[in-house]
Image: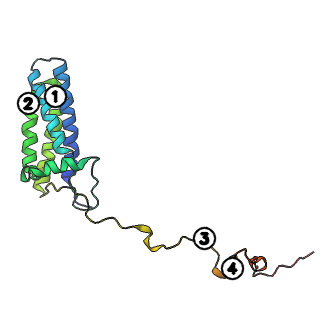
Amino acid sequence: MGKIEWAMWANEQALAAGLIYATGGIVGVAGQFRGWQFACFGIAAGVFVCLLEYPRSKRGKGTSVERTGQYCFTVCVKAFGPLTRNYYIRAFLHATLCVPGGFMLATVLGCVCLGIASLIYLTAAIHGEHWEPILPRREPPKRVGDSIKEPPQNPPPRPPPELRRKKADKLEAAAYDNPMSVTVSE
């Protein structure tokens, strides 16, 4: 059984938590609930977490699938260097951002989800994982059809060369020769 890449799970959990946290904040502000200031913080924290967590990290083994439009966010996250690369810092950041969400009912679910993401990031950090950006490849991809100079003329299945039809320029030579003798039996 392979090694679990905890950071991949934490990234998905934190992105969802950021969306839930921001949505809860919007509900709290729109409903003008008591303590709506915590809801304002929930909106800001949720949007920040979504921007931080949108770019996926490069996987240790296998192929890394980046999200659509991830490159511009990757450049921004990469610019902060060790602050965003270290998963201990991300775990602490998510843990501190989720605390104010516990004071309002509309943001409690986002708070709990972000707390869980914080624990998963702590597990990833303990296992020695760190954030590595997925950057575009420098070399162009290999072209598949370079070795084929001219496509085949006959569709498959192709008969052996000696049994193939000849060109119709010479009508007699173009006739198909059956290698098996055919006799009419009555």
- The x, y position of residue 2, in whole percent, is 25, 61
The Cα atoms of the two marked residues, 4 and 2, are separated by 82 Å
Q: Mark 1 or mark 3, which has the lower sequence index?
A: 1
Q: Which residue is mark 3?
A: 153
Q: Is residue 179 left or right of residue 127?
A: right
In the displayed orientation, state which residue is furthest to the right: 186
Relative to residue 96, is residue 32 depicted above or below? above
- The x, y position of residue 141, in whole percent, is 34, 65
In the displayed orientation, state which residue is furthest to the front: 169
The image quarter containing residue 61 is bottom left
Q: Which residue is mark 4?
A: 163
Near-viewer residue (57 or 170): 170
Residue 55 in view of the camera: no
Secondary element at tag 2: helix
Q: Mark 1 or mark 4, which has the lower sequence index?
A: 1
Tell me the amino acid under the disc marked 1: Thr
- The x, y position of residue 16, in whole percent, is 23, 39
The Cα atoms of the two marked residues, 1 and 4, are separated by 77 Å
Q: Which residue is mark 1?
A: 107
The Cα atoms of the two marked residues, 2 and 1, are separated by 9 Å
Secondary element at tag 4: helix
Mark whose residue sits in front, 4 or 3: 3
